[in-house]
Image (tube, helix red, strand yellow):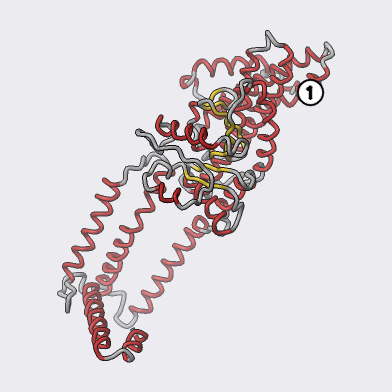
Amino acid sequence: ERVVLKGEKKKGGKKKKEAKEVKEERDDDEAALKEFASTGGKGKGKGKGDNNDLKAALLLTLFFYVAIWNGVFSNLPLEVPMAYAVHSRFWFQPNMIMCMFVGLGFSIFLQRRPNWIGARETPGRLGVIVVLIAAAIVGLRYKEADRSDADFNSVYGKAMLDSIDDGSLLLSHTDLDWNTVRYLRKCEGFKPGIVHVSAQLLPYPWFQRQIDTGMFGDVVFPEILPGVSTSRFSEGNKVLLERFFEANHQKYPKNMFVDMQGISDSDIQPGGIWRGWLMIPHGLVYRVEKPTVNVLNELPNYFRETEEELEKLQKVLVNVTPKYSSGSWEFACASVRNDAFYQAGLNFLTYGLEVGKALQKEPKLFTLYLDCLRRSTESLAGLVDVLVGQGEVALSYPPSDLVKNAALSSVKNLQANVAAKKIEGEGAEDVRIIGSGMELARKTAKVVVGAYLDVTLEESDPGSFRFFKGFYEQEFQGKENEI
């Protein structure tokens, strides 16, 4: 106010008068607030502020946030931890109002202070109480509230960008992928040559304004059709992605990427085929290619690419629990990191099972079959070893699915190694090299199948449970010394 008044003196009496009136109005409102607190909201304020009106406004605002905003306008599925955490961020406003009422209650307490608080001692004693309460809050909440180690989002975004070359096209579906990558590129200068597009914003009519600015270079945006959606499970969204890939694959034949959370898993066929497009696991994302006619025969060419990207992720975001629980962005980063291993493992497993179907007609495929199962078991069993038994499982998929698929992979891998040992005796050199992991295959199968039996209720999946139980009893019970 002094700065304003000082400036007004130079501009003439009219503006000085206006500034003085503003100051008087503020003084009136401040006096009304003080009286509101000192009288417990019962007195009548001076000037333009009426205490009853102020109290009614606070109560009405609190009612709006609690009943209308949180109860009616918010349509998030609160059974989902992340949605619940997002919803909880709107509690700040009603909490602020409650803090105002706490202050009011404290002022009433001062007026009606108990006998043990004398008039002279009141400030000192209450000061001690306030300090103790603040210290207790800090002591109880510091460990959980300390975010000095919270660089997970930065590490996550950098891990994604490290796997993608400049000049590539990246399509992001989730807030996690869109915001981390966008910040690192725009604010910290990481991989400025990547063209980054949000799949969530594509369907909106106003997005055309962003396209018209030319910020996306030579990316082609197909016409938005009726029925489009931002949900990856809807047909409208799947058609949108198909048409986007079709429009851009010639300009980005080997360097078009989409985050894994943007693709509907139920539509992925053996070998990573999604609605006619090849989804190659590439770290935290899929690399999108137009498949050739003999795509299943060419898939092994991509195995090394997938494994190299997984090796980079081995030491990234290994464990964020129990400090960061489900619903936090840190937990989401760890979950997507683990999803990358899970999807790669499923890719190897489903492709291996397809190869297995052709073994009778083409025995030469056995080496490829064994290689697929080894790779899938390494990815899936490795996740089981890290995640199962640690409390909250940082994975976007049901842990029961992970354990079941890992058990299936380890059983098939062990059976393939047994067959390889027989073939080895017949002089097949290539099989001897790949199938030399018999001991490891048996140990892995015992641990993973045992984990499945420990965490699975028989009534939840009777057929699979009986199969794995029978396998475990036949292979391992009474044979501990062999392993």
Q: Secondary structure at mark 1?
A: loop
Work out whether residue 132 or residue 35 is closer to the camera in this orientation and state it: 35
In the figure, 113 relative to 80: above or below?
Answer: below
Q: Is residue 134 left or right of residue 61?
A: right
> Is residue 20 depicted above or below 480 in this figure?
below
For the point 57% across and 39% down, which residue is it? 257
**Residue 449 seen in this snapshot:** no
Judging depth in this view, the residue of 207 and 381 nearest the camera is 207
Horizontal side of residue 303 vs 324, given as left or right: right
Question: Where does label 1 land, which residue?
Answer: 436
**How far across and how far down the image is residue 137, in percent?**
44, 62
Residue 337 position, x and y percent, is 58, 41
Q: Tell me the residue at 51%/48% (across/down).
A: 216
Q: Is residue 172 above or below residue 53?
A: above
Q: Is residue 377 left or right of residue 14?
A: right
Depth order, front residue of 30/177: 177
- Residue occupying the point 63% across, 48% down: 166
Q: Quadrant of residue 189?
A: bottom right
Q: The N terminus lies in which quarter of the figure?
A: bottom left
Q: Quadrant of the C terminus?
A: top right
Q: Amino acid at mark 1?
A: Ser
Residue 144 percent coordinates (x, y): 50, 55
Q: Position of residue 10 (x, y in %)?
A: 33, 91
